[in-house]
Image: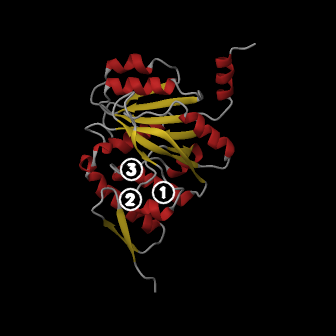
Amino acid sequence: NCPRNYLQRLASYLGPKISIIIPMYNTPVNFFEELVDNLIGQTYSNWELCLADGSPEENKELEKIYKKDERIKYKFIGENKGIAGNTNEALSLVTGDFVALLDHDDLLPLFSLYEIVKCINENPDAEFIYTDEDKFEKLGGKRYDPYFKSDFAPDTLRANNFICHFSVFKKELMDKLGGFRSEYDGAQDYDILLRMSEETNKIVHIPKILYHWRVHERSTAAGAGSKDYAIDAGKCAIESHLQRMGENGKVVVTPYFGFYRIEYGINT
């Protein structure tokens, strides 16, 4: 005669642990509180949140929020190591079976982690999982611009980081990749996805919206002009990928933000 919620939590803990890593930098308190409450409300409970804060000063208002739950680990770095360096600091806190990437201002549907673990159970060999996404501006507001992605396609990834959010790596794969590389800051996620595609073909797409991308004045989701520097970093990431793959190709930046074209040479 155990309470139903106790049985649900017990079942969750028998599944894989999902380690969610988030680099922080001057994170707005309201966004952070919404994020933490969102994760605490997840229907799947075997997760940990690994936070690495590269802000110039520690915000004491955040402390009462991240101390709401013992599954949350917070590390104040004391310096800004950039997006890749800060993410690697969060990665150093991971003890789970899978590593999920999340931004400090975005949210997940409350059933998101359940769907991720369901996918893992149904695809026990999976090493990388990604999902569909949409956008929102405020908690409880209208969701819009749904992005229904294709199943994995290497040539599509070379043209655009169509995976973006929500991506989950098996911990052993992330260890093999060695984390994020600072020389690709701005497109560090693109770089690691390209490198992931070189290491495994055990890639699963969940055709469901399991990520809500917040649109605000400082986010990439707000428009093309918000992170122009990422374009050059993305071009460099593709060029390095082609070189590692032994492909003879020139990467061309198109007029469409975040899209590239590869002009392949003729092998003689």
Could you tell which of marks 3 and 1 lies nearer the N-terminus? 3
Q: Quadrant of residue 10?
A: top right
Q: Position of residue 95 (x, y in %)?
A: 56, 34
In the picture, the disc for residue 195 is: 1
Mark yes or no: residue 175 visible.
no
**x, y percent for residue 55:** 30, 31
- Across and down, in percent, residue 179 comes to 46, 47
Instruction: Say what secondary structure mark 2 lies in.
Output: helix
Residue at coordinates 57% horizontally, 43% vertically from top-left? Answer: 171
Q: Is residue 19 above or below residue 145?
A: above
Residue nearest the viewer, comparing 143 with 9: 143
The residue that mark 2 highlights is 237
From this view, report whether residue 69 is shown above or below residue 21.
Answer: above
| 250, 154: nearer the viewer | 154
Gap between marks 3 and 1 measured at Cα: 11 Å
| Image disc number at residue 188 | 3
Q: Position of residue 254 (x, y in %)?
A: 30, 64
